[in-house]
Image (tube, rainbow, N blue to C red):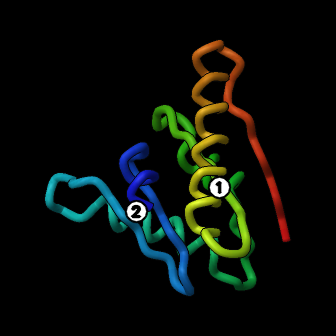
């Protein structure tokens, strides 16, 4: 996670409940509250289904943001998943630099 936290502004890790490693904000806790609220909306099960496309609509026009996730199993899975997510993010950054836009992934379980 240290490598991941050094490369990104916000790193959310999930272990049962969501938690976040956040950069310092202006002292109001607004960033932590926003990240926590979005994370809770995405992982909570209920009558209303909220996914990343819903979040995109809410955040549209707020500037550039990148999102990547990684998945792994077995020994060393946390590091492998973080490395997989970072590799995806590097591809997104390269696509932005070339003007190709950001890859989108929509997955509903």
Foreground residue, 25 or 71? 71
User: Residue drawn 69% across and 67% down?
Assistant: 50
Element marked by disc 1: loop
Q: Nearer the viewer, mark 1 or mark 2?
A: 1
- The Cα–Cα distance between marks 1 and 2, rounded to whole angstroms, is 19 Å
Q: Name the quadrant of the N terminus.
A: bottom left
* Residue of label 2: 34
Q: Position of residue 105 (x, y in %)?
A: 78, 47
| Left or right relative to 74: residue 97 | left
User: Residue drawn 38% across and 58% down?
Assistant: 2
Q: How many marks?
A: 2
Looking at the image, the residue that sits furthest to the front is 75
Mark 2 neighbour density, 10 Å: few (under 14) some (14–19) many (20 or more): few
User: Residue drawn 18% across and 62% down?
Assistant: 28
* Residue of label 1: 69
Q: Position of residue 36 (x, y in %)?
A: 43, 70
* Quadrant of residue 94 within the rendered picture: top right
Looking at the image, the residue that sits furthest to the right is 109
Q: Name the quadrant of the C terminus.
A: bottom right
User: Residue drawn 70% across and 83% down?
Assistant: 45
Q: Is residue 81 above or below residue 85?
A: below
Q: Position of residue 83 (x, y in %)?
A: 59, 51
Element marked by disc 2: helix
| Left or right relative to 58: residue 36 | left
The mark that comes first in sequence, 1 or 2, is 2
| Left or right relative to 40: residue 27 | left
| Left or right relative to 62: residue 100 | right
Q: Which mark is residue 7?
A: none
Foreground residue, 47 or 20? 20
């Amino acid at each position: 996670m240290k490598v991941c936290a050094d490369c990104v502004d916000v790193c959310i890790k999930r272990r049962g409940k969501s938690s976040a490693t956040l950069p310092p904000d202006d002292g109001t806790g607004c960033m932590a509250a926003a990240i926590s609220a979005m994370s809770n909306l995405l992982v909570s099960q209920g009558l209303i289904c909220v996914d990343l496309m819903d979040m995109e609509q809410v955040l549209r026009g707020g500037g550039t943001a990148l999102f990547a996730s990684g998945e792994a199993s077995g020994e060393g899975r946390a590091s492998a998943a973080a490395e997989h997510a970072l590799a995806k993010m590097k591809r997104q950054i390269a696509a932005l630099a070339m003007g190709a836009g950001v890859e989108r992934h929509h997955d509903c379980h």
